[in-house]
Amino acid sequence: MTFHRGLCSTAPPVWDETIVLPDSAIGELAAYARRKGNTWFLAVMCGPQAKTIHVPLSFLGEGQYRSVQVHDSPAENSKVEIENSIHEHNDSLTIALPAGGGFLGRLSKSQ
């Protein structure tokens, strides 16, 4: 996965909270959510086998969060797709990952 400069450049060097998500397994999948203030970053890195995971967003606080998501393009291996959406803590994300693929999301609380 090619990193999205805009999203990566907003990642803080120090975090208020880090959560390792349940689908994580050494050598297979690393999935975690990190918070700084009212903004969460969600990162998923896939190992050698393609996987589809479901990530409950229950770690989000009350209210709506603007989401920017960067993930591998299902149509072309060397490209990424960027999506914008709105989420709440009772939502979940379904993330399809190719072997060696990844996902990066920033969820910022709406004002």
Image: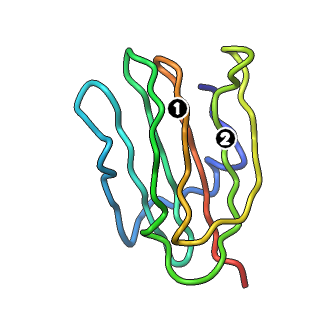
Label 1: few (<14), some (14–19) or many (≥20) C-alpha neighbours in 10 Å? many
Residue 92 in the image: state x and y as whole percent: 53, 57
Residue 83 in the image: state x and y as whole percent: 75, 46
Callout 2: SS:
strand
**Residue drawn at the location 68% of the way across and 59% of the way down:** 67
Q: Measure how far apart labels 2 and 1 are at the Cα level.
A: 9 Å
Q: Looking at the image, is 25 positioned above or below residue 67?
A: above
The amino acid sitting under disc 1 is: Gly
Q: Looking at the image, is 77 positioned above or below residue 12?
A: above
**Residue drawn at the location 30% of the way across and 26% of the way down:** 28
Residue 85 in the image: state x and y as whole percent: 74, 58
Residue that sits furthest to the left in the current view: 26
**Residue drawn at the location 71% of the way across and 65% of the way down:** 86
Q: How many marks?
A: 2
Q: How is the image coloured?
A: rainbow
Quadrant containing the C terminus in the rendered view:
bottom right
Res 68 quadrant in image = bottom right
Q: Looking at the image, is 2 positioned above or below residue 12?
A: above
Which residue is denoted by mark 1 in the rendering? Answer: 102
Residue 97 in the image: state x and y as whole percent: 52, 28
Quadrant containing the N terminus in the rendered view:
top right
Which residue is denoted by mark 2 in the rendering? Answer: 70
Callout 1: SS:
strand
Which sits earlier in the primary sequence, circle 2 or circle 1? 2
Label 2: few (<14), some (14–19) or many (≥20) C-alpha neighbours in 10 Å? many
